[in-house]
Amino acid sequence: MASGIKDKVAIIGMGCSRFGERWDTDTDGLINEAFNEAMLDAGVERSQIGAAWLGSALDQVNIGNSAIPLATSLRLTGIPVTRVENMCATGTEALRGAAYGVASGAVDIAIAVGVEKLKDTGFGGLPVPTKGTLNDLWMPYSSAPAGFAQLASGYRKKYGVSKEDLKQAIGRVSWKSHQNGAKNHKAHLQKAIDLETIVGAPIVADPLGVFDCCGVSDGAACAIITTPEIARSLGKHDLVTIKALQLSASSGWESSTGGWDGSYVKNTRLAAKAAYKEAGINDPVSQLSMTEVHDCFSITELVTMEDLGLSEDGQAWRDVLEGKFDADGEVPCQVDGGLKCFGHPVGASGLRMVYENYLQLQGRAGERQLKNMSMGLSHNLGGVPYNSIAAISIVGILED
């Protein structure tokens, strides 16, 4: 029976570029910005890297196909380098490849890199690639804001929440991210916005206004992975280990049956259930010190709180308004500003979330530092609620 990878791999170094409109550099520059920080953090030599995974979601835009862009950027010679893509879960997928490579014993030290360079391509939002000939024939088509706005409609209908109350709650989700992003010098958006401005902003897809939608960014993030034993031999202590890595992809059930009511994301619930089992979590509210979730739209973050079991079903809107997920709340969420303000270079986002958890667990988050850190969760959601990929990463301090 599968036992998972809990505490079988340690993260000994992480780095993250500044996110934003990076007219000042190219893809190679972003990769090296994140990689150099991670290598300095880990204190290892390039020659010690045994394998690498590259995550980029929109290869046709700027980076290119295959793993060659990473191998050439970092001058990786004679080692296996693999490119992965899984929509917005791509960065987590790269981490999963590196972690599984180390946990299997196939490699001692591996790196995971996620990168996207979008702002100089002309895309103002996410491009919509084909889903494949067969899927395009029968799957419903909509823009990303429209697809996620349907969550709000399904949620309101199921739980009887007024339009005004839900608008205030999702507005507070965005308000929180702007408050937190203002303390992050690497964030794309570093300006606090008042709640009235957010709630009163022009509508993109009812009830989502301009401030309820994240944009896209340029950026890269990197993690260096090894075993706890090798980490200790390198003089590392207070190790951050991976407690769980789980992923769930739609089978087509949500959009091809009448069984889904549109008020939740099934794959997030499935991935969370598997991740909690792997990590040994039975009470996420008390056991998780913080979360970084896929707030592509403010309603997504609100519904995710219920999908992760951090709010009772139908109560997340109340918990958000009461500050449960604020930086000083019971379960802080998006302490670094989230996708909304740190930014969303698609292939890097999953690793960026783990980067914040990693910094917080090591007490290195500066002005954003939280107290009493033990475990942090990251969540990605690729696609749309009716056709999605959900990924969960949980990292924490290794208990001796």
Image (cartoon, rainbow, N blue to C red):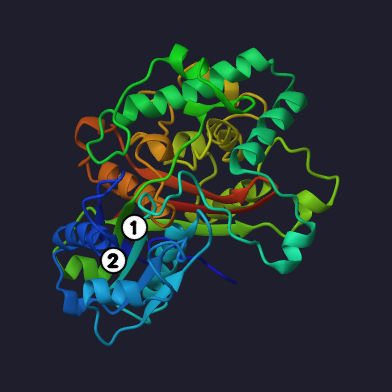
Q: Which of 75 and 332 is in front in this view?
A: 75
Q: Which residue is drawn at 28% across and 74% down?
A: 109
Closer to us: 120 or 384:
120
Residue 25: horizontal and vertical position, in percent?
23, 55
Label 1 Cα neighbours within 10 Å, binned few <14 / some 14-19 / many ≥20? many
Q: In which quarter of the image is the C terminus?
A: bottom left
Q: Residue at x 53, y 31 (%)?
A: 298
- Residue denoted by label 1: 241
Mark 2: give few (<14), some (14-19) or many (20+) Cα within 10 Å: many
Question: Could you tell me how many numbered marks the image carries?
Answer: 2
Identity of the residue furthest to the right in this view: 258
The residue under label 1 is which amino acid type?
Answer: Thr
Q: Tag 2, which secondary structure?
A: helix
Residue 31 sits in quarter: bottom left
Vertical relation: 310 (above or below) 11 = above
Q: Tell me which label, 1 or 2, sits earlier in the chain.
A: 2
| Whether residue 318 can be seen here | no
Image spot of residue 388 (x, y percent): 63, 52
Q: Name the residue under label 2.
A: 228
Q: Position of residue 154 (x, y in %)?
A: 73, 31
